[in-house]
Every structure is written in C-alpha cells, then in structure tokens.
Amino acid sequence: MILIPVKNLQNAKQRLAHVLDQPSRTALAQAMVHDVLDAVFACSPASDVAVVTNDPFASRLAGDFNFRVIRDNNISETDAIAMATSLSHSRGAANTLVIPGDIPLIKSEEVQHILAAAPPEGSVLVPAADGRGTNAAFRSPANLFPLRFGNDSFQPHLQAAHKTGLPFVILQLPGIALDIDNPADLQRLVEAPGETRAQRLAREWNLTSYPLAANE
C-alpha cells in the first residue's frame, strides 16, 4: 500500500512566507500534491494507493484518481502515518510505502525503482537532498517499525531499520530527494529540468528579487 500524507494545504509552507503570500503557498502545495499523485498513478493500481489527509482539496483530488482517502483528523504527520499504517496492516496490506505530498519532481520510474529494490522482508529508505529528512520509506511487513517525520528523521529511520535485523536498502533518487521547504528549494525547483505543475507555477513568479540562497 502506498500512503501519501497531506496536511492542511490552506496553511501550507509557512517557511516560504517571506517570499510568497498564503494564496501562492497554497497554490504551490496543491500543485505539488497533484504532481505526486500523477507520478504514483502512472505506476501503481489505484486500489493500492491511499491519501492520508483531512484537506478538502487533497481529498477531492484523490477521488479524481480513484485513490482511497484515509482521514487523519488533523493529527500530526507522524501520528497520521501511524494510524494509516495500522489500518492498512489490519486490512491485510503486506507492505507500505510512504511518500510525502511535497516532492514535485518525483518520477514514476523512481517509485518503481523503490518497489523493485525492496526486499521481501525489510525496508527501503530514500533520504532528502540534505541527507537529514526521509522522503520515502518502504516497510515489509507494513508495520515493521514506526516512522517519525521531521527535519532529522533519516538517521532515526536508518537505526530503526538496522535494529530489525532484516535487509534494508538506501536509494539516492534525485526527483524524490527534493522537497520544497525553504526559498532555496523553490529556486532549485524552478531551475531543474522538467515541466511539472509546481515548476510551471513557480516559474510564473519573480523570484530573482529575493536572496533565496541565503534562506536555506
């Protein structure tokens, strides 16, 4: 089961507040979720995907793709994924792959790479570009170890994977690696090759007047 957590998009991306107003940040967050769902839809049966959210836009978009929606009742991302993992496991899911909704350069081939590299029992971790966060986590069995999200989640996840005694794989996947949390990430999104929804939107804004590199 692929789980895609999406928090409230109306208050999204507060760390971009000094370069984008809230309507722009919401539009960017919505575009990024759409990019992620597009990539997942291209490589996975809709019945194997669930969007974990309480956001109305994300829920409607999930419906457009015929993805399941697991309501998170506005709890934290860590708690939402714990709840969705437990639910998926109870429904017979053999494994879970958690992918965030703010990685707009994700490619369907990268999702397929994760699934192809996954051991029958064990895990796959994909770090964020800065090496601190975790931008994809596969677990088999589905509840092999808990996931705890935040700026420094990768090392705790790596330690948890190691403690299971089962095989674990670390993949460096550039599309999945770029999440958009600060102005420097936004500039990287603009400059990267591609024409995702988020890229097209960001390229409409005049970002050259902001000291983006100084805000990492």
Image (cartoon, helix red, strand yellow):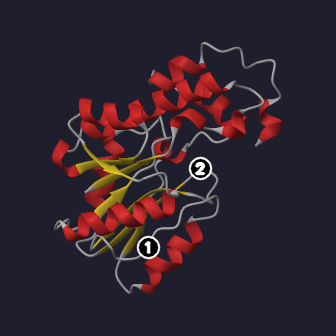
Q: Where is residue 130 in the image (x, y as percent from the top left)?
A: 64, 53
Quadrant holding the N terminus: bottom left
Task: Mark yes or no: residue 197 visible.
Answer: yes
Vertical side of 87 occupied by 7: above or below: above
Image quarter for residue 152? bottom right
Residue type at tag 1: Pro
Tag 2 near tag 1, CB within 8 Å? no
Dividing the image into 4 quarters, which one contains the C terminus? top right
Q: In this view of the protein, which residue sits in the foreground, 8 or 204?
A: 8
Q: Which label belongs to residue 42?
A: none
> In the rendered structure, which amino acid carries the disc numbered 2?
Ala
Relative to the observer, which residue lies in front, 22 or 74?
A: 74
Which of the two discs, 2 and 1, sits closer to the camera?
A: 1
Mark 2 burial class by Cα count in 10 Å: few <14, some 14-19, many 20+: some
Residue drawn at point x = 83 percent, y = 28 percent: 211
- Residue 208: give x, y in percent of width and height: 76, 18
Residue 43: x and y, percent?
A: 23, 41
Pointer 2 residue: 129
Q: How many marks?
A: 2
Q: What element carries label 2?
A: loop
Q: Assign a secondary structure to mark 1.
A: loop
> Which comes before the other along the chain, label 2 or label 1?
2
> Residue at 56% across / 43% down in the picture?
179
Which residue sits at x=52%, y=67%?
A: 148
Q: Nearer the viewer, residue 141 or 123?
A: 141
Q: Can residue 194 be seen in this view?
A: no
The answer to whether 56 is drawn above or below residue 53 in the figure is above
Distance between mark 2 and mark 1 Cα atoms: 22 Å
Classify residue 141 by image quadrant: bottom left
Callout 1: 10 Å neighbours few (<14), some, many (20+)?
some
Which residue has dot 1 on it? 146
Residue 84 figure quarter: bottom left
